[in-house]
Image (cartoon, rainbow, N blue to C red):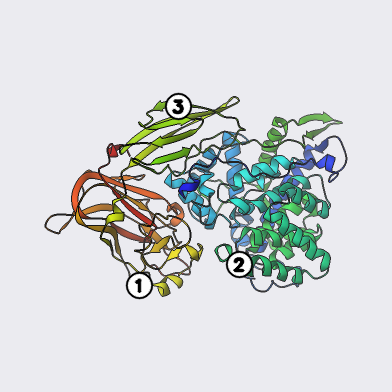
Amino acid sequence: MRKLEGKHIRLFFFSAFFLVSSGLLHAQETLKISASVLEDKIYASWLGQCVGNIYGLPHENIYIEEPGPDDFPLGYYDLSRLQKNDGAFSDDDTDIEYMYLLAMENYGPEPTYGQLAESWKHHVRGKVWLANRAALAAMHFGYSPPATGFKANNPHWFQIDPQLINEIWAVTAPGMVNYAAGKSAWAARIMDDDWGIEPTVAYAAMYAAAFFASDIDSLIQITKKSLGPETRFYRSTEYAENLYREHPQDWKTARRMIVQRYYHEEPPDTRTIWNANLNGALGILAVLYGRGDFQQTLDLACAMGMDADNQAATLAGLIGLMKGSQGIPQQLLFPLPERHWEKPLNDIYKNVSRHDMPDISLRELARRTLQQTEKIILQNGGDKWSEDGKVYYKVNHEARFIAPLELPAGPPPFIEAGKSFRFPIPVSGGEPPYRWGIRGGVIPAGAAFRNGVIEGKVPKPGVYKLRVEVKQGSEKAQREYRLLVRGQNLALSAAQVLAGVKKTNIAVRDAMWLSVPRSFYAEDLEPIIRDGQTLGSGSTFYSIEGEVAQQRDFYGYEWVEEQWIGLIAYHTGTVEENGGWFKTLKAEYRDGAGNWREVEDFVLSPKLPPELPEGVNPYNKPHFVEYLLAFKPVRTKAVRIVGEAGSASHWKSKKIPFTSISELTVHGPQRGYKGL
C-alpha cells in the first residue's frame, strides 16, 4: 500500500483520434445535429437503459457455465415491479447517472471528484456492491477519488461497477468521443483501476459516436481506437470480433470461447462473474451479433449471462440512442396494455433505491440532460444557432476532457523517526507542469518540501500539519496534510502475540459469501500481524472461530521487559459484506498486578471515541485502512486493542461477528498525539 501512497494520478491514456479525419463518421468538416433530434436521442437513451435494466433483471447472475435461453424475443420475465411502480423505477444501472445529473446541475457540467464524493455519501445509503461499495466506504473514512479506486485501497478494482453507471458522461458529449472517453475514464477511477476502467472507456466512445454513426462495425473500430492496442480490452474486443467473423451465425460458440478465456482461464484473484473485462467482452459480442437491432441486441445481452442486466441496460441505451425513440419496439415501452399508458413506461422514473432523489418523468430527465449537454457543447468549442425555425448545434469533435485540478485525500505517508521517507503529494487533473507552495503549517525538522514532494529524515516522533497548494494555469487547489512521525515498531521485539482467535475456522469462513480475492486470506494470525505487509497475498486474517452469536475481539503483544508505549496502529485487511469490522475499539494495558486497564486520554483517529462508523451496513466499512489509537504513555509488559466484533445480515451468510486485521504496530510515546 505504501508504495502507491504518493503516486501522481493521471487520466487513462487512450489513443487520440479524430472521428472525421479517420473516416469513421461522415467526412464532413463539422458535426451538426438539431436540438429536436439531440433531445430525442437522449430521451431514447434513458428509455433504453430503463427497458434494458428491467428486462434484464431476471437474468442477472444466472447464466454462468451455459448461456441463457435463445427463444428470442425473451420478453419481460417479471412485470411485478413495473406494475407496482406503474412505470420505470430506479436500479443501480440508472440511479447513479441520475445522481450525476443532479451533481452537474448543482456544481456545473464538470464537477470535481470532491463534489461527486459528497453526492455519493449523501445519496447512496445502501443497495451498493463490490467496487462501488468499497469506494463509498473509503469516502466515509476520509479518502477522496481516485484514491477510492486504487488497487491498494479497493480489492474490487477490476469489477464491472463503473461501466454500468457512467453512460451519462458520453450522453452529454454527442460526437465528442475523446472528451467522452476521457471524462468516463476519470469517473471510472472513482471505484476501479488499471484495466478495470477500460470497458467504461469503450462504452463511452460508442455512446458518443452513436449520435452520428449508425454502423456497428464503425462503432467497434471507434471503441478500439479509444483504447489503443496496448490495452487489455482492445485485445478482448479484437478477440470478440474474430470470433464473430469465424462464427457469424453461432453466438453460443463465440460466447463459450469468451467465457473460457476470460472466466475459466482468468487468474484466480480476478476470476469473478462480475469481472469488467469478461462482461465487457460479452457486451461486445451482443453488439456484434445484434447488428443494431434493438430487440436482438437486448435479448443477446441477457442470454450472454454473467451480470446480464447491466449489459442489457447499457446496450439497450446505446441502440436506443443510435436509433432514437422510434427505434425502440412499442411492446417494450408499453408492456402493460391494461394500464392504458399514454406515454412510454408511463413517463415515470420512480426512485426506489437512493436517498433524497425525487421521482421524475423520463421526459424531464431527457430535457434536463439536454441542458447539461448544451453547456458541454458550448464550453468545448461548439456552437448553437437557429436555421429555418429550428435550433441546431455544431459539435467540436476534437474536444478533449481536462479534469478539474484537485489534491485528493488518500493514505497518509508512513514516517518512522530516524528513517528516510519520501512522499510525493498526489495530484489529479489539470496538466503539468504544476506550481507548488506551502500555505500554512510546519515542515518537521529534517524534512523538506520541493516540487510537490515531502522528503527527509525526521529525528523525533511528533504530529505536524501542513497546508499545500498546487496551481496550474488559472486553477489552484489546497489540502491540509497530517504528518505523523512515529517511533520504531516495538511489536517486532514482542515475545508473544495476544489474540482472542489465532487461527481462522476455514470451514466456517468458506461457507460465507466471499467476494474479495481469496489470495488475501491468511489462516494463521501470528505470521502476518507484524510482517510489514498490509496488502497482497496472505495479508488478511479473519477472527472466525465458529458460528457464535456475539464476539469480543482483541489483538496485542506481550514483552519480557516493560515497554514505554503511547501509540498503537491497527491496520484492517479486507472486509466482507457480512462482517469484518470493529463496532467499538479501545486500548488496554496490563498493570503490575496483571490486570487489564483502559488507557487514559485515549484518542482514536480518524474516528473519535468511543464509536467506529455506526450501523451494520458495510457500505461505510473500508478495506485496507489504518486506525490510530493514541493515549497517555504507559509502562507495561502487554498492550492490546479490544472491541466488539461487527456483523451484518446477509442473504447467503449467517450472521457471524468477526474482525479483519493485516497489521498491528506498537510505538513509544507520541508527542502531540491529541492533535491526531
Q: Are marks 2 and 3 in contact (CB under 8 Å)?
A: no
Q: Which corner quadrant of the image does residue 301 belong to?
A: bottom right
Q: Give coordinates of residue 333: x percent, y percent.
A: 72, 57
Give the amino acid at mark 1: Gly
User: Is 628 situated above or below 53?
Assistant: above
For the point 81% across and 57% down, the residue is 292
Residue 546 is marked as 1
Q: Secondary structure at mark 1?
A: loop
Residue at image mark 2: 61
Could you tell which of marks 1 and 3 lies nearer the N-terminus? 3
Q: Secondary structure at mark 3?
A: strand
In the displayed structure image, the side of residue 125 where residue 587 appears, left or right: left
Query: Counting other residues with Cα less than 10 Å from the Cα at mark 1, is it few (<14), some (14-19), or many (20 or more)?
Result: some
Q: Give coordinates of residue 335: x percent, y percent.
A: 71, 62
Q: 454 and 616: which one is in front?
A: 454
User: Is 134 situated above or below 402?
Assistant: below
User: Is 224 situated above or below 182?
Assistant: below
Foreground tag (2 vs 1): 1
Q: Is residue 169 visible?
A: yes
Give the amino acid at mark 2: Asn
Q: Is residue 324 visible?
A: no
Q: 260 and 348: which one is in front?
A: 260
For the point 35% across and 36% down, the residue is 458
Residue at image mark 3: 438
Separation (CA) of disc 1 from disc 3: 53 Å
Give the amino acid at mark 3: Ile
In the displayed structure image, the side of residue 223 where residue 647 appears, left or right: left
